[in-house]
Image (cartoon, rainbow, N blue to C red):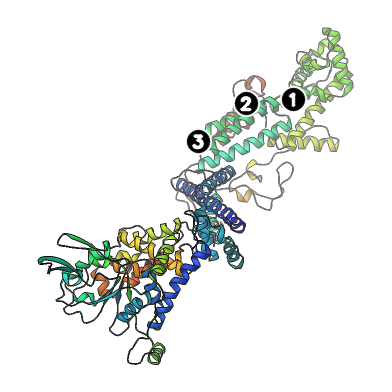
Amino acid sequence: MHQAASIELARLRRRVVTARFLEGTVLANCVLAGAAGTVVLVARLLGSYLPPDWSWLWIGLGAAAAFGAFVAWRGCWSLEALAAHIDRRHGLGGLLIAGLERDAVAWNPELAQRIEQSRAELPSFHPQRWLVRAVVVAGFAGGIAILPPPETPRQQSMVRGELERIAEEVELALEAGSIDEESAEEMRDRVGEMQRMLEEGDTVEWSDADNLAERLEHEESLRLDRLEAARAELGEFAKAEDAAGSTAQQDLSSAMEHAAELGLLEDLPKELQDMLGNMQSAQDGESSDSELQAAAQKLDVAALGLNAQQLQALAKGLQNAVDGELGKLAQLGKLPENELEDLDAILQAAQDGQGFGLGGQDSERSMPGRGGVNRGRGDAALEYSNRSDTDTSKLDVKRLPPGVAAPREWSIVGMRRTAPESDAQRDNTGGSAGTAGTGKVTWRRRLAPRHRDAIRRFFSSRGKEPPK
Amino acid sequence: MSSDSADALLSPERTERGRDLLGKLRGGLGQVIFGQDELLDLTTIALASRGHLLLEGLPGLGKTELVKGLSSLLGLSFRRVQFTPDLLPSDITGGPVLQEQDGKREFVFQQGPLFANLVLADEINRASPKTQSALLEAMQERQVSVLGDRHVLPSPFFVFATQNPIELEGTYPLPEAQLDRFLFKVDVPSVGPDVLVTILENRRRGQVPELECVMSEEDLQEAFAIVDGVFLPKPVTQYIARLVAATHATNDDAPDMVRAFVRHGASPRAAIALGEASRACALLAGRPNVDFDDVKRVAAPAIGHRIVLDHAARLEGVTPAQIVEDLCGAIDPLQEALPEGLR
């Protein structure tokens, strides 16, 4: 065969193979994308959800390319077919196809001349139709892929929100030192597990989220109770006339135990730490600094033989450490309201040089940020202690007795009929909290006013002022 | 005369020789008939293919003159038979005649007008079917059988028949089997004024000029040999096969027109005829091989009379030529279509 004809044949073969490959690839892509899009769409219509993934794209492209290669291999033209096309295109009068089967050497000059004179070009690529198909199907699949995921049922979305809140709380608690790293890690794992269940469409029970929240609160409450206990014992120590007395030393020992449990001894001044360390080693024959906390938990201050000044210094150091810790909790919003007020009063008193004392308390309901329709006026500025100078009492909810019309001076914003709201609260004391806590957890429970009064009366009747 | 090896295309010289031979014949016919180039080409092709030709046209268009001119150009024996309803088979084949020789009486076969190289069966559709069918054996097997005796016809043997598409009263349309024996059925069209002017200028009293023999019998045999040497490539063979197969309404590739109007498609003899005629067509064009265009050119006269249309076609006025034209447009010579993105 003449060289010019061979070159033309080879060029056409390449183009046909390439076109077949592209044709197969585009076709397979269209089919796969269409099928995937349809499956996702049908799944959504049937109430299920298949979240699209980028891996689908790569798998689809790979499969389409493989199919394209198969089509190119299977659709590869025979030499006769190629020759027939070139013959027709160049108007060679069948000389090329005849030359494949018969010896046509004598006609080679004629063949070369005709190819040379022919102005016909080999078929060129016109991928517009492929592109249109690909764009249409890609648009279909892409449109389905970018559809927002279906909304989870309301309850599950609330659970999801609660889990996110718990996760945030865990991080805050860890940052505040309210919980240890091990507990935080466990709770993180548990939150992550439940979030994964939600992602996979499984149902997460409220009770599981509540248990987790309870555990977090329990951990925080324990720490807070210990802080409170330590502060109360230090207060008792401060009130004692004789700092070296046995009662005062007992109070100081208890405060030290709580401080040791909270890991606050490391916050003591260096000289106090050295003093405690030296005395402990002298007492027990041990000198390891790493075991200072453990040693302090069974420390008997009376056995240390400290004088009054040393005891006062130790109490002050502990007081500073406890107050510092309370301050940190307050900054992170982990301190209950009444504690915040106490702390505010303490700080105020300290600034005024009046020593420690408790400030007055406003009605809880009138404070902004309490939630509900009586949350307070919108322009009420929140302060550090969540109190506001703005009078918010006018926004209290008044429940009218049945059949009683609203007073004339009232402006009715709206009327609604609602089901009774249950406001169940978790029992934060839980298990062992009773032994380690001081009972304030009980007072932080949200109770109906009559129940609160009953509890207040019960404790008042024992001659002791209930904690605020 | 150069010889070509069996697995080689005809040499350019031999191809040129074949083209010259056919060209001379074609040129000679041009002196007889004016303005009918397609008719003359097809007549030349039919002759070179050793096929029989059926000419159909109105009276006075030169059908008979064409055949008479052909006989003059070829220098072959020529007989003309005017077919009439009372013509008997023996009138054309010949028959035994009782003769007395040397005191003995015996039947001697008297050759009829079929025993000639060129036989003009004028107005063939006016003869009875019985007489028409007498041509079957002669045309297909180039022999006649009379009273059990076979009589071989001279070689070459061509039947050129004419028929008139009007005045159909008292005529006998040729049966399909008879039609199938003709290589081509060519419609002789009317001519335009320009051609008429040429005719008027060159024909006084309708007299055809004296024609010289341009091709001896040896030349004709050589032309036949060269035509036989024209190569039919496989893709073209496949195209012929697909084309003929698609004349059947049940074929998958059959175009809508075939499905709608064709009752019976062409026979394998049509494919053979198409191949042979394409060879001659290619040689007339000076090619050593058949091209797809050669097939397309001879498709209408070779296939048209071999397909049987149904009544719907008659009602719609669809002709076989239209069917074949549609067929050629629908069947792509290239079996493999270009991929979608290549043009």
Label 1 – label 3 distance at C-alpha: 45 Å
Q: Nearer the viewer, mark 1 or mark 2?
A: 1
Q: Secondary structure at mark 3?
A: loop
Q: Secondary structure at mark 1?
A: helix
Tag 1 subunit = A
Residue B116 is situated, as x and y percent measured from the top left of the image, at 27, 71
Q: Which residue is mark 1?
A: A232
Indicate the quadrant where residue A361 lies: top right
Q: Is residue A6 left or right of residue B145?
A: right
Label 2 – label 3 distance at C-alpha: 44 Å
Tag 3 subunit = A
Query: In front here: A342 or B109?
Result: B109
Q: Which residue is mark 2?
A: A459
Query: In front here: A191 or B85?
Result: B85
Residue A426 is situated, as x and y percent measured from the top left of the image, at 57, 31
Marks 2 and 3 share the same chain:
yes
Residue name at image x 40 percent, y 87 percent: B195
Q: Nearer the viewer, mark 1 or mark 3?
A: 3
Label 1 – label 2 distance at C-alpha: 18 Å
Residue type at numbered disc 3? Thr
Residue type at numbered disc 1? Ala
Residue B338 visible in rendering: no
Instruction: Give the number of the disc on residue A203.
Output: 3
How many residues crowd mark 3 within 10 Å: few (<14), some (14–19), many (20+)? Answer: some
How many residues crowd mark 2 within 10 Å: few (<14), some (14–19), many (20+)? Answer: some
Residue name at image x 85 percent, y 21 percent: A314
How many residues crowd mark 1 within 10 Å: few (<14), some (14–19), many (20+)? Answer: some
Q: Secondary structure at mark 2?
A: helix
In this rendering, the answer to whether A442 lies above or below A133 is: above
